[in-house]
């Protein structure tokens, strides 16, 4: 479980952990303490003996984990458990917006294939939801 303790709904992490304990699996926590932690944890998880990587947070958290998985993304299934503010990826994919309901979807074995975009023009970056630049970048920095 890779998670951002500062995500919009991070106060629900204990309930989410309880729900994850209902799965027939051992859950290992990898919290983020600073930017870049989740990418490093994702590399560790991808190289480890994990059957599934669950990311709990918002779109930024998912983005960081996907960039950590990079080319290993196709080998390790990724569960998205929405704890962010907007959770746009979950909305786009019509996934449950309640993290406990999202665990139920994981338990049910609901799997979807998702394209991963490789963004070139500098260090290789990856995206699963949206890539923007120019004016939208200025809007993102000015709007809360």
Image: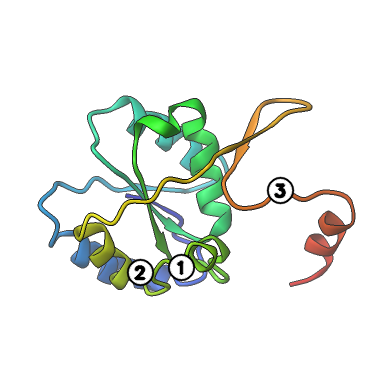
Classed neighbour count for the residue bearing mark 1: other residues with Cα under 10 Å, few (<14), some (14–19), many (≥20): few
SS category of the residue bearing label 3: loop
On the rendered structure, is 48 left or right of 62?
Answer: left
Q: Position of residue 36 (x, y in %)?
A: 55, 39
The mark nearer the N terminus, 1 or 2, is 1
Q: Position of residue 47 (x, y in %)?
A: 33, 25
Q: Which residue is mark 1?
A: 94
Residue furthest out toward the left: 24
**Residue name at image x 50 percent, y 34 percent:** 68
Front: mark 1 or 2: 1
Please give the label number shown on residue 72: none
**Residue name at image x 32 percent, y 49 percent:** 1
Q: CA distance from mark 1 to mark 3?
A: 19 Å
Indicate the quadrant where residue 13 lies: bottom left
Can the viewer see residue 37 in this picture? no
SS category of the residue bearing label 2: helix
Can the viewer see residue 104 in this picture? yes
**Residue name at image x 76 percent, y 26 percent:** 122
Front: mark 1 or 3: 1
- Camera-side residue of 71 and 7: 71
SS category of the residue bearing label 1: loop
Indicate the quadrant where residue 22 lies: bottom left
Please give the label number shown on residue 131: 3
Front: mark 2 or 3: 3
Q: Which residue is mark 2?
A: 99
The image shows residue 136, relative to residue 142, as above or below, that is above
């Amino acid at each position: 479980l890779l998670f951002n303790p500062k995500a919009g709904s991070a106060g629900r992490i204990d309930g989410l952990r309880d729900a994850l304990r209902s799965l027939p699996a051992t859950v290992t926590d990898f919290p983020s303490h600073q930017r870049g932690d989740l990418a490093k944890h994702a590399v560790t998880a991808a190289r480890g003996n994990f059957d599934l990587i669950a990311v709990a947070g918002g779109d930024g958290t998912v983005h960081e984990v996907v960039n950590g998985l990079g080319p290993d993304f196709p080998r390790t299934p990724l569960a998205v458990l929405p704890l962010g503010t907007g959770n746009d990826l979950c909305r786009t994919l019509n996934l449950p917006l309640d993290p406990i309901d999202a665990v139920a979807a994981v338990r049910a074995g609901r799997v979807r294939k998702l394209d991963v975009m490789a963004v070139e023009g500098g260090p290789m970056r990856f995206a699963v939801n949206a890539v923007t630049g120019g004016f939208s970048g200025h809007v993102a920095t000015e709007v809360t």
